[in-house]
């Protein structure tokens, strides 16, 4: 039992208060899942958390609001103004502190990362509670499904919100959250509940485009590797491909091709988060495995000399030249996830470079064959959109989508052994 600001608090009470501070608001079930590190806590464990929350409410440190959502019965719990100040004392947050907001760095390593922000920023978003709770479900999976070695740190939107000025116009980029993979790659999270229209998606990506242009104009590094759209589990069963077509169409229509090539756009349902992120963690090793498999497959097809080429920007497989006695064939080679924009942006760069590839010294005096595509992937085959959704004048991209679908081979990688 600890005494903080004259309140007697047990270890469990302190942990629950800290979770509510880090994550702004959670249901009792989510608090139980996080505290006991289990997606399915025992009834006794859930009952225990309910009892502690009741005591914290009586102490006026926690408040609750009943959810008007048939999918999630119960209430959302959050800190009162008094509870908010108590937690700041408990976590030793200095007055006026401005830190980076990464939660695991603060919680597990004891490094101060939480800022002295006003209470208004910490209240759960009352108009988007379902959106917020899906994000919390995502954080829970990050906490309980990844080992210490593959720990995925994360922070909320108030810490990764960034103002900028481009073309004399002020803007702000505000993803829902940010994660950092063990290799240091950052991904910005956009929770997607299929409520944004195509025009709203276009506006979202136009904002990203302006932000990237601002960074380039000021010689600033891009602070994230990609954008991850997170959907709920039901989306996997109903409308996943249709939603991806909508999102990636808006992305390709809004972004400059060179900018889009630097930023990977991904989409995953909640129940596929671990698979998706582990694939991202292993990308370099998976590219090496794909290179070996590429040699095997093309040797089996009768090519005696295979030359793989790597993209300089991210060290990923880009294309390969396969030579037999009198001819050669160029293969576009890609290693990617099921819903991954880099398949389109890399293929676009490949098509732009195709004439120069045909002029390489390695293929002089050889007869060219028609190029093919080889795509390496995890257990789910990548989905190729048939056409861009909505009005546009991007005939080149439409033609490239058609070419991409022709003469394509999908090869599954064994990600467990990498």
Image (cartoon, rainbow, N blue to C red):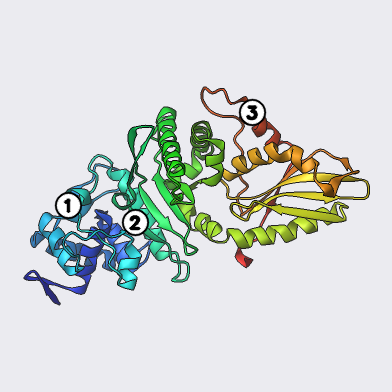
- For residue 118, the mark is 1
The mark lying in front, picked from 2 and 3, is: 3
On screen, residue 262 versus residue 95, left or right, reads right
Question: Which label is found at residue 396?
Answer: 3
Local SS, label 2: strand
Instruction: Locate residue 290, reporting x and y percent.
Output: 69, 57
**Residue shown at 78%/58% (left/top)?**
295
Q: Residue at x 58, y 26 (%)?
A: 394
Of helix, strand and loop, which one carries label 1?
A: loop
Q: Mark 1 touching mark 3, by CB under 8 A?
A: no
Question: In screen coordinates, is 172 left or right of 86?
Answer: right
Q: Are marks 2 and 1 in contact (CB under 8 Å)?
A: no
Rendering coords of residue 95 (x, y %): 16, 62
Say above or below: 164 vs 105: above
Q: Is residue 315 above or below residue 353?
A: below
Question: Extreme right residue here?
Answer: 325
Residue drawn where x is 40% and y is 36% of the image:
207
Disc 2 target residue: 155
Labels 2 and 3: the sequence-earlier one: 2
Left or right of 231 in this view: 345: right
Q: Which quarter of the rendering shows the C terminus?
A: bottom right
Picture coordinates of residue 252, whole percent (x, y):
53, 34
Whether residue 407 appears in this view of the structure is: no
State the image quarter where residue 287 is shown. Answer: bottom right
């Amino acid at each position: 039992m600890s005494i903080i600001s004259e309140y007697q608090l047990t270890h469990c009470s302190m942990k629950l208060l800290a979770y509510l501070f880090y994550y702004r608001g959670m249901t009792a079930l989510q608090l139980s899942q996080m505290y006991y590190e289990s997606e399915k806590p025992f009834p006794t464990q859930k009952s225990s958390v309910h009892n502690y929350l009741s005591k914290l409410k009586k102490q006026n440190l926690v408040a609750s609001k009943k959810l008007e959502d048939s999918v999630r019965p119960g209430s959302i719990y959050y800190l009162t103004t008094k509870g908010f100040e108590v937690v700041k004392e408990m976590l030793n947050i200095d007055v006026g502190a401005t830190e980076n907001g990464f939660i695991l760095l603060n919680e597990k390593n004891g490094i101060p990362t939480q800022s002295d922000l006003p209470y208004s920023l910490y209240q759960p978003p009352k108009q988007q509670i379902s959106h917020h709770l899906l994000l919390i479900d995502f954080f829970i999976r990050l906490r309980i499904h990844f080992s210490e070695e593959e720990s995925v740190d994360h922070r909320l939107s108030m810490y990764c919100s960034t103002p900028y000025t481009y073309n004399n116009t002020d803007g702000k980029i505000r993803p829902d959250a940010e994660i950092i993979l063990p290799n240091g790659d950052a991904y910005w999270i956009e929770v997607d509940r299929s409520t944004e229209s195509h025009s709203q998606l276009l506006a979202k990506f136009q904002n990203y485009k302006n932000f990237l242009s601002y960074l380039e104009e000021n010689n600033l590094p891009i602070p994230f590797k990609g954008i991850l759209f997170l959907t709920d589990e039901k989306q996997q069963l109903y409308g996943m491909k249709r939603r991806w077509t909508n999102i990636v169409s808006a992305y390709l229509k809004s972004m400059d091709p060179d900018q889009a090539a630097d930023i990977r756009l991904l989409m995953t349902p909640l129940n596929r988060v671990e698979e998706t992120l582990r694939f991202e963690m292993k990308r370099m090793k998976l590219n090496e495995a794909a290179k070996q498999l590429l040699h095997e497959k093309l040797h089996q097809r009768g090519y005696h000399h295979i030359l793989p080429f790597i993209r300089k920007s991210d060290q990923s497989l880009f294309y390969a030249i396969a030579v037999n006695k009198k001819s050669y064939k160029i293969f576009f080679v890609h290693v990617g996830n099921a819903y991954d924009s880099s398949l389109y942006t890399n293929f676009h760069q490949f098509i732009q470079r195709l004439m120069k590839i045909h002029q390489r010294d390695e293929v002089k005096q050889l007869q060219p064959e028609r190029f093919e595509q080889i795509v390496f992937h995890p257990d789910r085959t990548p989905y190729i959109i048939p056409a861009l959704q909505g009005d546009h004048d991007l005939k080149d991209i439409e033609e490239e989508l058609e070419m991409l679908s022709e003469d394509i081979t999908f090869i599954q990688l064994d990600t467990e052994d990498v």
